[in-house]
Image: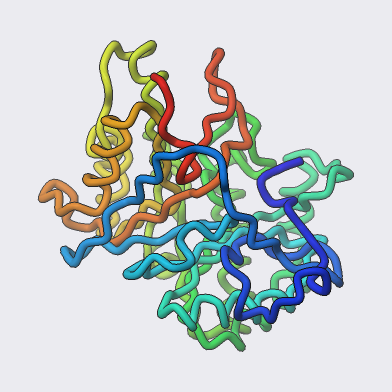
Amino acid sequence: MNRRQLLIKAASLGLAPLALSGLSRLTTDNSSLIAPAQATIGSARIYPKVTNQGVDLGAYDPYGDFSAVQGVKIEHLFLPWQDVELSSLYAADSYAGSRGRRLLITIEPWSWSGDWKLTPRQLRDAVLGGKYDETMASMASIIGQLKTPVTLRWGQEMEDDSGRFSWGGWAPDDYIAAFHRFHRLSRDNAANAKFMWSPKGKKNLVDYYPGDEFVDVVGLSVFGLQKYDREEFGHDRSFPDLLQPGYDVASKFGKKIIVAELGYSGDEGYVKAWAESVTAHHPQFPLLTAVVYFNDKEVHPWPGTFGLPDWRIGQSVVTA
């Protein structure tokens, strides 16, 4: 069971799409919408601070914890490009639009089905060989009809060769060619969409840059785990500490930067410090325009014994 498999039948909800909260997981069959599940465990619900200092707050929010939070500017969705009911995007559009939010849509070039069997090489060859051209065009044709401003984030964290993603660790030239293909087919069918190139933040991210004409904004991933900090570094690390290395490399392109995936977990003091800091004005990050909280449990184990951290609001305060 992964982070995007909380599906229930829309009929059993008795709710119209606009009433759904936390519409961040899209349906993977023809009759399901995403459950507005509410997290009920845990007492300390510390939200990232909403400010008017130029750093917007967004959320990937499958549990609906941010549904009524005023000032949230970005609604983040994840969807695969196989085994997904694209008409659910219309409900997501209504949900975001009714709250004055714009959409960030992460498109992952694989299926979330347990039957997915393509190796990284097979996926690369299929993408570059045009097997998924119709898929990309079909997705973009729906996205092009949405009323909410949309930014598309395709094939994230591509420089991470840990094996987490089938497209992670491709040769840079292959990834760039695939990104160009996605950009062209999407631009032809969703002319108003913007495009995010979103590495993890490793030093070699520069090798995968698709070029200025293909990128409107750069995304990064930043996660703070107090237990990891203390055992591996001997002290707590702050949001600026963890953003700085990736920012220093990515800022060389001169594009606006968004932390597209943000999470933190630790004791109450650690979480409060991060919550205050992530949207604060940091003069060393002049290109940072937004942070997007990842309000879910981790799905890929951290190294060693750190397991699957829980970034969810109400769950992220733990004993370090």
Residue at horizontal 66%, vertical 79%?
A: 17
Picture quadrant of residue 131: bottom right
Q: Is residue 294 left or right of residue 167?
A: left
Q: Is there any visible trace of residue 303 in the rendered image?
A: yes
Residue 106, how many percent across, how many down? 57, 60
Whether 247 is drawn above or below 181: the answer is above
Residue 21, how many percent across, how many down? 58, 67
Whether 22 is drawn above or below 296: the answer is below
Frontmost residue, 148 versus 265: 265
Frontmost residue, 109 versus 31: 31
Residue 284, how many percent across, how many down? 13, 46
Q: Residue furthest left?
A: 283
Q: Quadrant of the N terminus?
A: top right
Whether 164 is drawn above or below 74: the answer is above
Q: Is there any visible trace of residue 205 in the rendered image?
A: no
Residue 77, how many percent across, how many down? 57, 62
Residue at horizontal 40%, vertical 61%?
A: 58
Q: Quadrant of the C terminus?
A: top left
Picture quadrant of residue 127: bottom right
Q: Is residue 184 left or right of residue 208?
A: right
